[in-house]
Image (cartoon, rainbow, N blue to C red):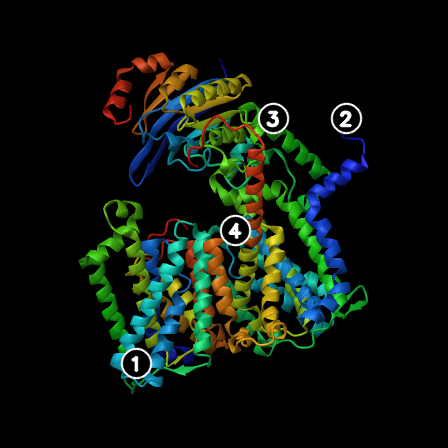
Amino acid sequence: MQEKAFDIKTAARRVWRGYKAFLLFTPFIMTLPLWAERLGKAISLNIVYLMRMVGTFTLVAVGLNLLMGYAGQASLGHGAFMGIGAYTSAILATRWGWPAWIGILLGTLVAAAVGYLVAPILRLRGHYLAMATLGLGIVAYIFFREMIALTEGNVGIREIPKLNFLGMVISSRNGEFYFVWIIAIIVLLMCQNLVRSRVGRAIRAFHQSEVAARVMGVNVPSYKMKVFVLSAALGGLAGGIYSHFQGYINPSQFDVMLSIQLVVMVVVGGMESIWGSVAGASLVVFLPSVVEALPKWLGNVPAWVRQYSNYEGLVFGAILVLTMIFLPKGITTSTVDFFHRKIRKAAALMGEESTDSPPRGE
Amino acid sequence: MGETILSVHNLSKAFGGLYALKNVSFSVERGMIKAVIGPNGAGKTTLFDILTGLLEPDEGKAVFMGQEITGLPAHKLAGIGISRTFQTVRIFPGMTVLENVMVGLHHRSHCGFLRAALKVPSERREERYIRDEAFRQLELVGLEMMAHFPAGSLPFGMQRLLELARALATGPELLLLDEPASGLNTYETEELGEILKRITERGVTILLVEHDMGLVMRISNEVLVLDYGEVIAEGTPQEVKDDPKVIEAYLGGDDV
Amino acid sequence: MADFFSNLPQYLVNGLGSGCIYILMAMGFSLIYASTGIINFAQGEFAAIGALVAYTFAVKLGLSLPLAVPLSVALVGFIGLVLERSVILPLREKGALTAIIGTIGASIFLKSGARIIWPEEAYKVPEFTQGQFNLPKVSFNAQLLWMLGLTFLVVVSVYVLMNRTKLGKGLRACAINPEAASLVGINVSVMSMAAFSMAALLGGLAGLVSAPFANYRMGLYLGIKGFTAAVIGGLGDVYGAVLGGLTVGLLEEVVAGFLSVALGISSGYKDAVAVVLLVSVLLFRPQGLVGRGLVEKV
């Protein structure tokens, strides 16, 4: 067979076709600290610092996108898994001095285990699942607040040590940036592989027609559970990293508002889109800082712009509603669809044969 | 013909006291096309739902190739050789035509989360197999040109064919088709008849619910008539056509 | 343990009070669900705004209560109407996930709006009448009597409205089958508007009678507990809400009392009781404890 012979050109072409976005994005992100410092100074944004947060939230957003965007299962309580990861790692590090990377790993596993324990709620559908996950998020928050012996309650856990990996302390901003983005790119890559595989097709299939997917042999409950556990684990991973970046955590960082922000990342960034999660995380992380920087760009801004943090929720609420009304698939997916339609129309004009039977509705 | 592939024994199913199926028994022999006809609401779709594990019967059982299938979950039935299409088309509209058919190969492949995420060589090999096989099914129904279009953008007739290709991709011994010709024009219906014949030539047995009597008479070897959930006649198309009970059931209803 | 039992009457009285609030909240959820199939995640915000507006009218502007209360409730009803027109109408027929996210967005929007206008941690909403009753084992405020009375009045009026008026018949028809309802000439869009306004009225009332103190954050818990009550009573069953509301109110107080007095566990877990109840009921008896609700899609 011709295919067997290794041909560097076709191999390269195949990699390029399958991983175009990664081949463009990875160099961009890896070189970012080199030029962003200066650019950031010019526009009064601490870009590397913010991108470090984007990387962290990308991890949980991409997991939630697998669950909500691809599998169609709403979770309004995903902040809880971040909290579980964060507390696990923070407690292990501050109480027993465990190395951060082991804490993060264990936090990921604990979040996955909790996800597995609550997975039976995936029997619920639509609104009920949404309300139940919202409720479980609240329960998790209450536990963070009330299990004072473990979590210090509202006081929070202070002086969480910086990251260290195999004896190497990662405390510089750039070091943290690379740490989180190397993980994020690996996770994004794996998630993209996943959604383009047999597993990904099965997940998207039961989202679109559960009955048909079952008849095609997809074990729907089992897949729902696995996607949920995976997204819980990614939440735990993000939370663990987050706690070592911040150095301080308290329950209110993991309340319902965080869960809603995660939903904003997925929904606005783009459902059923791996890169949409990155876009969504960037939007949510950058928006407050951009608004904060506005006075420095424009000189004078109205007083209400300066008090952005007061009405941040107003903006997020409006964004959610408007996105649902005008771009229900989110920014990324809607843009991609738009260009696909253009390309297809162009292709049709170029003289593709029209089909015999006219369209007759859906 | 010989070997019995499916036998149904005294199947009953009621919804809120109303019988959708009442004591239904019949059998299907390998390699034939058997049509199930009857007025609307005669219980045909309920029968299909039970045979594909979407509903559990109140009483009775169905045996497929020597194995009792009633009570098995739907996703297991694809694995033992039963597949179906739906009265109202249930494709996956947001996926491409090819991906739709690839879902049909789900139970014939094995890669789980980890191997898929890491894209190991065995996963790549399996993907290639799934893709080639799916293409073959598309060629069989004549949709290979449309492979990369979103399934939801296809015209209705093609969506029916796509559903058929997807069902075939599971590699069924028995194919249940729920009104495959409804919504098709004459030309498309004729083409469908040809495709169905080609499918049986490959050794696939077909159980068919259909309202288009022309198609039923032309292609089926046997016809089973249901009315109010009960079997009122069974036989060759000609026998059934002349059966006074059948004529009465059809003229008595509003669905001729 | 003995402490717990001697406190029990007090828990029951407290539970009765919060039960009334949950009844009103639950009726709001059920009304909207029955006529539109949507679960309104902004229902809790109606309550918070109702209470805060009442504070502004009664305390800031110094209106007398008989004037301030109806005004506040009416204003919240109007907000419900605006919400329906601006968010629900464009999202109808677009699937559950879209509606969920839409009402979540509206809820965040309302909550932040409330936070801008009422940024403090607690506003004192005046009680309808001052006074406290001290019986041998229990004591309660005069407000409790108002709550009981108003809730009773609301339940009766909703009953009359649903069963004796054309509007009520339209709402019930939409609940059973919206397509058929529109075929016989019922304006489904108007019914959806009516349901949202009424639910907002009920929510606003619930908030304003609920607590001596109000803040912009109170909507979340009132919302999820009211929803729990609605599910227990059978979501979509407006009268099941009565049973559901009382169940949640009483159980919450008794369980929290038991945890803190008998087991020495922090009473901060009180708010988790309703959620645990909610998840258990949804998983094991989705049609509600009375089993007359419209839910079969769970």
> What is the CA distance from the residue labelled 1 to the residue labelled 3?
75 Å
Among the two numbered marks 4 and 2 on one chain, the one whose residue lies closer to the N terminus = 2
Q: Chain of mark 3?
A: B
Asked whether the viewer can see residue B53, the reply is yes
Q: Which mark's residue is nearer the viewer, 1 or 2?
A: 2
Q: Which residue is mark 1?
A: C143
Front residue of C17 and C178:
C178
Distance Cα–Cα, label 3 vs label 4: 32 Å
In this view of the protein, can residue C283 be seen by the observer?
no
Residue C138: which quarter of the image? bottom left
Give the amino acid type for the residue marked by disc 1 in the picture. Gln
Q: Nearer the viewer, residue A349 or B232?
A: A349
Q: Nearer the viewer, mark 4 or mark 2?
A: 4
- The numbered dot on residue A329 is 4
Report the front residue among A118 and B223. B223
Tag 2's secondary structure?
loop
Image quadrant of residue A79? bottom right
Of badges 3 and 4, nearer the viewer stands 4
- Above or below for B158 versus C91: above
Foreground: disc 4 or disc 1: 4
Q: CA distance from mark 4 to mark 1?
A: 48 Å
Q: Which residue is mark 2?
A: A1
Task: Give the spatial CA distance, label 4 vs label 2.
Answer: 42 Å
Give the residue number, with chain letter if any, for mark 3.
B136
